Amino acid sequence: MFETFADRVNATQTVLRLGETFSERFLIGYGEEEIHVNVDRGRIIAMENGSFLMRPWRFAIRAEKPVWAKFAEPFPPPGFHDILAFPRYGHGSVEGDVTYLLTHFRYVKAALSLLRYPHEGRHYND
């Protein structure tokens, strides 16, 4: 699911503009897998899978694989439509510096929305 995520984010100008002030590391919990995402001014410069000791991250978004699969549907059902709905409906968690996440929420939400159209030429806000 996340194999082409960095390429899609880096190719979508609308998302890059939203992330111009976002430079940070965050974690995506994809079931038992941990995906460390390193962003520099909106551009994803590295994504690494694995549990790394002492690998810093500012915030984490964690959910099981079936939850991410529902989130990635073009029209996800209620409770799977937004990463902030994950903890509210018991589908996952948001951890760490939530204030920082909310400060850059438009970028994070726009980037993750690209998971909904992995095989189409459609981009965020097209």
Image (cartoon, rainbow, N blue to C red):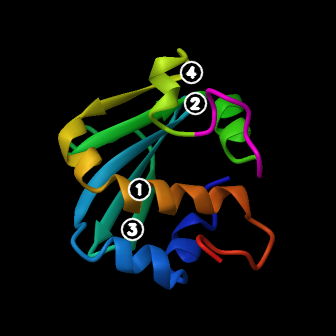
**Amino acid type for the residue under numbered disc 3:** Ala
In percent of width and height, residue 101 lies at: 28, 46
Circle 1: residue type: Val
Q: Which residues lie in the magenta part?
A: 74-81
Find disc 1 in the rendering and name its residue. Answer: 108
Name the residue rendered at 51%, 69% in the picture: 6
Q: Are marks 2 and 4 in contact (CB under 8 Å)?
A: no
Judging by the rendered image, the residue that carries numbered circle 2 is 31
Q: Residue at x 63, y 32 (%)?
A: 80
Q: What kind of element bears circle 3?
A: strand
Q: Are marks 2 and 1 in contact (CB under 8 Å)?
A: no
In which image quadrant can residue 23 be found? bottom left
Chain-order first, disc 3 or disc 4: 3
Of circles 1 and 3, which is in front? 1
Rounded to the nearest angstrom, the CA distance separating label 3 from label 2 is: 20 Å
The x and y percentages for residue 27 are 37, 45
Q: Earlier in the sequence, mark 2 or mark 4?
A: 2
In the rendered structure, does residue 78 fall within the stretch colored magenta? yes
CA gap, disc 3 to disc 4? 27 Å
Q: Label 1 vs label 3: CA separation?
A: 16 Å
Of the two numbered discs 3 and 4 in the rendering, the one whose residue sits closer to the viewer? 4
Report whether residue 57 is seen: no
